[in-house]
Image (cartoon, rainbow, N blue to C red):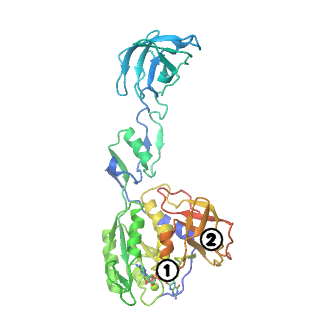
Amino acid sequence: MEKTRNPVSVAEAVARVIAKAVRTGTESVPLAESYGRILAEPLTATHDVPHFTRSPYDGYAIRSADSAEAFGGNRVTFTVVDHIGAGQVSRVTVGAYEAVRLMTGAALPAGADAVVMFEQTAEAGPLGFTIRKAFASGENLSLQGEDMQAGEQIIPAGSFIQPGTIALLATFGYAQVKVARRPVVGILSIGTELLDVATPLEPGKIRNSNGPMIAAQLARMGIPFKMYETAADQLEESLLTVQQALLETDCLITTGGVSVGDYDYLPEIYSRIGAEVLFNKVAMRPGSVTTVAVSGNKFLFGLSGNPSACFTGFELFVRPALLQMTGADKVYLPYTKAVLAEDFSKANPFTRFIRAVYDGFSVRPAGFNKSNAVSSIARGNSLIVLPGGTRGYSAGTAVDVLLLGVEEGTDEWLL
Ligand SMILES: Nc1nc2c(c(=O)[nH]1)N[C@H]1C(S)=C(S)[C@@H](COP(=O)(O)OP(=O)(O)OC[C@H]3O[C@@H](n4cnc5c(N)ncnc54)[C@H](O)[C@@H]3O)O[C@H]1N2
Ligand code: MOO
Ligand SMILES: [Mg+2]
């Protein structure tokens, strides 16, 4: 087994992964289940919205010409000839000094070209009202096609379906939506020291926190997973599970056993199954041992066993790869600049990703920040990115921050 590895830059590693992503294909799902999915075809307006001119107010539809003389004390009187609410259509054609009482959302009756709000009128007898100002043609109208016009392309394929997209799909009558099929992702935690969550601690053993964490990172992306039984650091056993997972899933995430230790068997497993290793060392901390391999058209993500490295490896590599597989147009974590709230004095031979708390303006490390830390993953909502080859940063410096847990990413990678 090779013991020296050549690190690639984070940018190079991400680019290699993205280049290998194979599309998952498409499927049709009910509108109610389409939230969070990736739109597989562009959404084009099939009709004008609104598709009829309507009133944006509760009031009266009039002919604007009849209001021309209204000014201050010179009030003009109208007679109400019909009364409709939203969803109703008046059969009346509005004539001279006539009005239709109508509610917000109701179709503008024939003949009328303006709406007077209730607040702009004074009652005049049981069937009349007066106004004291002139209305322009088109005043207080919600015009046909003012929002969208038939044939217009509204949302491109590859868009994340957010609540507003759902509203659009509903507007145009999509009871079924064509979306990208979500990859099914296998999770395999490897380590003889690992105990399941309900098991009491024993000397030398720890509970498996990476498996459940990865499951949650997938859940936050809306991606289904299959959790394999935790494997011991045992070559044949892990190999069989990896082979089984390649049959049952679209890609496999392993955690642990990927470094150069005597019981780190993943490098051997990649070689046994003939997988192409895209990289096995990245110039980053934590997660320098992160390995990504491809078998057939399936990814094998070899994330580090160290929890912070495992977490970071998922966000930097697994997340964009899975999104790319769905044809999403914004596969990268969103980022911003923020002011470092406290000194960070460690040197950074490699690009450093620090679990951090970002408050919209400043950012500070989220506590104990070694590769094996669990606490700072839980406390953080972001990652500070400090470029390699730097000697530490002082409070007040503007730094790059990757934002975590945001519904939709960006189409440009920070690094
Ligand atoms: N001689 C060297 N030793 C190490 C190197 C190196 O370059 N040369 N790299 C170090 C770095 S950096 C990391 S990161 C780790 C990566 O190790 P592995 O990915 O092989 O993972 P393991 O050895 O299996 O475990 C590492 C660590 O993480 C704990 N662990 C493992 N799985 C889980 C889990 N599911 N939940 C919670 N914690 C887990 C495990 O008990 C170990 O403490 O290698 C360094 N060594
Ligand atoms: O790969 Mo290790 O997480 O750099 O610390
Ligand atoms: Mg190891």
The amino acid sitting under disc 1 is Asn
Residue 222 in view here: yes
Residue 278 in view here: no
In the rendered image of this protein, does residue 83 appear above or below residue 154?
Answer: above
- Of 106 and 414, nearer the camera is 106
Q: Is mark 2 within 8 Å of ligand 2?
A: no
Which residue: 54% across, 83% down? 5
Find residue 171 and report its image quarter: top left
- Of 153 and 288, nearer the camera is 288
Q: Indicate the position of residue 36 as horizontal and vertical percent values.
A: 40, 54
In the rendered image of this protein, does residue 242 appear above or below residue 82?
Answer: below
The amino acid sitting under disc 2 is Leu
Quadrant in which the C terminus appears: bottom right
Q: Indicate the position of residue 367 as horizontal and vertical percent values.
A: 55, 74
Q: Mark 1 = which residue? A: 372
Which residue: 52% across, 11% down? 76
Q: Is mark 1 within 8 Å of ligand 1?
A: yes
Which disc, if any, is residue 66? Answer: none
Which SS class for mark 1? loop
Q: Is residue 32 left or right of residue 108?
A: left
In the rendered image of this protein, does residue 362 appear above or below residue 34?
Answer: below
Q: Nearer the viewer, mark 2 or mark 1?
A: 1
> Residue at the top extreme?
96
* Cα separation between marks 2 and 1: 19 Å
Q: Indicate the position of residue 159 as horizontal and vertical percent values.
A: 46, 51
Q: Residues within 10 Å of mark 1 (few under 14, many from 20)?
A: some
Q: Indicate the position of residue 193 as horizontal and vertical percent values.
A: 38, 86
Q: Residues within 10 Å of mark 2 (few under 14, many from 20)?
A: many
Which SS class for mark 2? strand
* Among the two numbered marks 2 and 1 on one chain, the one whose residue lies closer to the N terminus: 1
Q: Mark 2 = which residue? A: 386
